[in-house]
Image (cartoon, rainbow, N blue to C red):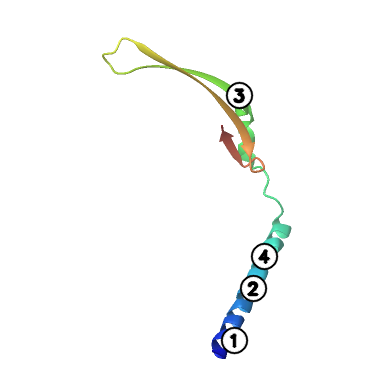
Amino acid sequence: MKSKQLLLLIVSLFLVVSLVSAEDEAADMMAQYGPMGQPEEMKSMYWFIGDWDVTQQWKMGPASEEWEKSTATATYSFILDGRVLMMD
């Protein structure tokens, strides 16, 4: 019974040390490379930022003579330090 407890203690200590080591490595990597920031390609998307009102028209089929109509509003903004363009 004591050998099981000792084995459990050793495994637990190993896991704790591994987790602390992994956190230290991640912190070292962040310090080395710094924040990613916004990629150059995303700067060409600034014109998209803001609120957009959209109106669509379509026919339900080739034989249909009536036009259906739909309106919507979309809001575009950058998230994740400018790395992602989000439509809300």
Residue extending farthest right: 31
Expressed as whole percent of the image width and height from the top left, the position of residue 32 reads 72, 59
- What residue is shown at x 64% (from left), y 78% (from top)? 13
Expressed as whole percent of the image width and height from the top left, the position of residue 58 reads 38, 17
Amino acid type at image mark 4? Glu
Q: CA distance from mark 2 to mark 1?
A: 15 Å
Q: CA distance from mark 4 to mark 3?
A: 40 Å
Dot 1 or dot 4, earlier in sequence: 1
Q: CA distance from mark 3 to mark 2?
A: 48 Å
Q: Are marks 4 and 3 in contact (CB under 8 Å)?
A: no
Dot 4 or dot 3, earlier in sequence: 4
Of badges 1 and 4, nearer the viewer stands 1
Amino acid type at image mark 2? Val
Amino acid type at image mark 3? Asp
Q: Which residue is mark 4?
A: 23
Expressed as whole percent of the image width and height from the top left, the position of residue 11 reads 58, 79
Q: Secondary structure at mark 2?
A: helix
Of badges 1 and 3, nearer the viewer stands 1
- What residue is shown at x 29% (from left), y 18% (from top)? 61
Return the residue nearer the eye: 67 or 7. 7
Q: Which residue is mark 2?
A: 16
Q: Are marks 1 and 4 in contact (CB under 8 Å)?
A: no
Q: Which residue is mark 1?
A: 6
Instruction: Check disc 1: other Cα within 10 Å, few if <14, some if 14-19, many if 20+.
Output: few
Dot 3 or dot 2, earlier in sequence: 2
Residue 77 circle label: none
Q: Quadrant of residue 37?
A: top right
